Amino acid sequence: MAVFSSIRAADDSGYAETLERMKELVPGNPGYLGYESARTPGGLGITVAYFRDHESLTAWREDMEHQAAMRQGRADWYESYTLHVGTVERSHGFVRNG
């Protein structure tokens, strides 16, 4: 699992197109399980991406297009970010019906 928290720069021209490309690309990783993402009106964004194992996450990190997007993010799109990598030990949920 990777938890990516970020504050985007005021001018994030090209970000949306690159994000869409990453959303197209990451499912090609056999260990990719999905993601959840939210952004506050103040600009804080948090994305949690789930991978089957550390090797799958490493393969995503090493993908050449993803590496180019990460470089551009540091150069142009992010004021700051943090990345936390961990393992999910247990997960459960609840949905109210009605």
Image (cartoon, helix red, strand yellow):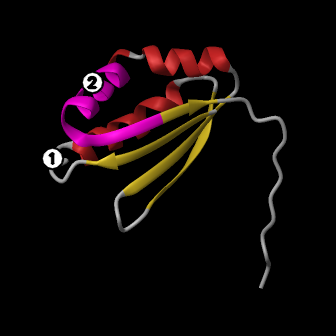
Span of residues in magenta:
65-82
The x, y position of residue 27, in whole percent, is 52, 32
**Residue 94 location, quadrant:** bottom right
- The correct choice, above or below, for 7 with respect to 25 in the image is below
Q: Are dots 1 and 2 in contact, CB under 8 Å?
A: no
- Does the magenta stretch mainly form a helix, a strand or a loop? helix
User: Which residue, given by chain and number where applicable, does mark 2 sit on?
Assistant: 71
Q: Nearer the viewer, residue 78 or 21?
A: 78
Give the structural element (helix, strand or loop) at label 2.
helix
**Residue 88 location, quadrant:** top right
Q: Nearer the viewer, residue 44 or 30?
A: 44
Residue found at x 39% / y 45%: 6
The x, y position of residue 38, in whole percent, is 49, 58
Give the structural element (helix, strand or loop) at label 1.
loop
- The correct choice, above or below, for 44 with respect to 90 in the image is below
Residue found at x 49% / y 50%: 46
- The correct choice, above or below, for 58 with respect to 76 in the image is above
The image quadrant where one finds the N terminus is: top right
Would you say residue 27 sits in the magenta stretch? no
Query: Type of residue at label 2?
Result: Arg
The x, y position of residue 82, in whole percent, is 45, 36
Residue found at x 18% / y 43%: 14
User: Which residue, given by chain and number where applicable, does mark 1 sit on?
Assistant: 13
The x, y position of residue 98, in whole percent, is 77, 85
Residue found at x 57% / y 22%: 57
Q: Around disc 2, counting alpha carbons within 10 Å, would you say few (fewer than 14), some (14 to 19), or many (20 or more)?
A: few
Q: Around disc 1, counting alpha carbons within 10 Å, would you say few (fewer than 14), some (14 to 19), or many (20 or more)?
A: few
Give the label on residue 36, or none.
Answer: none
**Residue 40 location, quadrant:** bottom left
Query: Type of residue at label 1?
Result: Ser
Q: Taking 76 as reference, is 33 left or right?
A: right
Q: Taking 51 as reference, is 26 left or right?
A: left
